[in-house]
Image: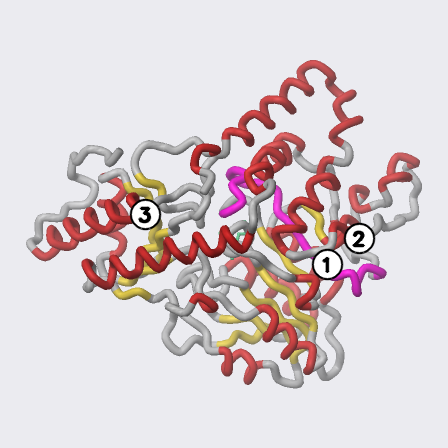
């Protein structure tokens, strides 16, 4: 859809669900901010001071939030800690946290930090097949002892998409707060965090938002909670107008900005500033439509030509994110061999190959070529001639 705005590397890049490609605008924005540093030194802060605040409304559109419900700051892990410190207040009966056994490990580590601090328990919704979750199992796990739930919008391995609206409502009907990790959905589909009543959310900008390795993350706090003063405070969460009065008492900034802590990296924010221009005037429903078209096309090709690979991503549009996960015992060898042939996909132990046809820059022709290469590799495996790491095949262009 916007391929011309990206620096396309040689070969075929299908790993935008891990690290998005570089938009030319991101590079230009970083160069501009570097020049400002070079020329103005500390004077640059006149403009940099509210850079996060200026980016937040743009990012808010991607998650369906009001402009003051989003802060651009930190990392998923750090933001989770900041939000849990404030939102996780175990009571006598409602005392435990609910997550799932398929969550990205850092989420579980962060949650466990807080349950161990409080002497409570982290419960995990089990998966029946090791790759996906059943709606009914999540509901069943929302028992009377649960105080807070954290779920992924899209599962990082299988690409299964959960129903944010229904699960948020179910949590609230039981009097439980619910937060979401939107790492694998932001920039790939529209969200409606405000209207869905989500209590809080976290995400990164280095995947489908293309803001570069280690880009600053984002957090959402619903308007209904904005009277809460963050438990973990820092001067960057102070009211902006009086931040430099250097008062000893903390006056929270309005909105989610209060959950910021320390000085942000302006160079990293600059990359996000540039990357966000790719989304200017972009209809997020059209983006999602294009993404579904690509994943449908890819799965159809897999059905026809790669029957040895098991598609573990759900087929229903309502239950699928932006990538496709293929299970095979030789997935590691396949991912290495693909890379040798110029196709970048990624491998998740023990047996999953993840490929993300990103709507912003990937094409159907790239998917056709990838399937053809995978077919050759699988044939090579059958004949015992696939030696990943040793072949000298040329790059696909
Ligand atoms: C779902 C999910 N959560 C969290 C992270 C990583 O968190 P952080 O940005 O703090 O490194 C990832 C990284 O890929 C992820 O996929």
Mark 3, mark 2: which one is toward the viewer? 3
What residue would you read off at disc 3?
364
Residue shown at the point (74%, 16%) measured from the top left? 40
Q: Residue 275 location, x and y as percent?
A: 56, 37
Magenta residues span: 208-227
Most extreme residue toward the left is 383
Q: Mark 1 falls on what kind of element?
A: strand
Question: Is label 1 in contact with label 2 (beta carbons under 8 Å)?
Answer: yes
Quarter of the picture containing the N terminus is top left
Numbered mark located on residue 255 in the image: 2
Asked if the stretch drawn in magenta spans residue 148, the answer is no
Magenta stretch, main secondary structure class: loop
Numbered circles on residues, count: 3
Between marks 3 and 2, how big is the CA–CA gap? Answer: 42 Å
Residue shown at the point (42%, 58%) measured from the top left? 292
- In the foreground, 268 or 196: 196
Q: Residue 267 location, x and y as percent?
A: 62, 30
What residue would you read off at disc 1?
221
Q: Earlier in the sequence, mark 1 or mark 3?
A: 1
């Amino acid at each position: 859809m916007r391929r011309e705005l990206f620096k396309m590397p040689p070969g075929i890049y299908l790993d935008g669900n891990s690290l998005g490609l570089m938009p030319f605008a991101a590079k230009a924005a970083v160069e501009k901010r570097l020049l400002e540093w070079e020329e103005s030194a500390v004077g640059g802060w006149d403009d940099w001071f509210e850079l996060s605040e200026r980016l937040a409304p743009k990012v808010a559109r991607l998650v369906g939030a009001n402009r003051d419900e989003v802060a651009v700051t930190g990392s998923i892990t750090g933001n989770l800690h900041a939000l849990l410190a404030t939102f996780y207040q175990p009571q006598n009966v409602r005392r435990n946290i609910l997550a799932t056994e398929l969550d990205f490990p850092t989420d579980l580590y962060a949650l466990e930090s807080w349950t161990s601090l409080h002497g409570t328990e982290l419960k995990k919704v089990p998966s029946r097949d090791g790759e996906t979750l059943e709606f009914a199992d999540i509901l069943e796990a929302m028992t009377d002892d649960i105080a807070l739930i954290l779920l992924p919008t899209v599962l990082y391995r299988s690409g299964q998409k959960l129903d944010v609206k229904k699960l948020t409502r179910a949590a609230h009907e039981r009097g439980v707060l619910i937060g979401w990790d939107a790492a694998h959905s932001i920039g790939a589909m529209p969200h409606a965090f405000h209207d869905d009543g989500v209590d809080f959310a976290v995400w990164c900008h280095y995947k489908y938002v293309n803001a570069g390795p280690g880009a600053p993350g984002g957090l959402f706090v619903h308007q209904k909670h904005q009277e809460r003063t963050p438990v973990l405070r820092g001067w960057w969460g102070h009211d902006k107008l009086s931040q430099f009065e250097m008062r000893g008492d903390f006056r929270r900034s309005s909105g989610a900005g209060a959950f910021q802590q320390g000085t942000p990296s302006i160079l990293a924010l600059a990359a996000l500033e540039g990357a966000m221009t790719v989304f200017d005037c972009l209809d997020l429903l059209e983006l999602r439509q294009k993404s579904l078209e690509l994943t449908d096309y890819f799965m159809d090709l897999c059905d026809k030509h790669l029957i040895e690979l098991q598609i573990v991503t759900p087929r229903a549009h309502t239950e699928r994110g932006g990538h496709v996960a293929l299970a095979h015992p030789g997935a590691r060898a396949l991912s290495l061999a693909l890379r040798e042939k110029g196709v970048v996909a990624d491998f998740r132990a023990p047996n999953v190959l993840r490929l993300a046809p990103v709507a912003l820059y990937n094409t159907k022709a790239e998917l056709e070529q990838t399937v053809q290469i995978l077919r050759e590799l699988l044939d090579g495996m059958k004949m015992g001639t696939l030696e990943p790491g040793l072949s000298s095949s040329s790059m696909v262009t």
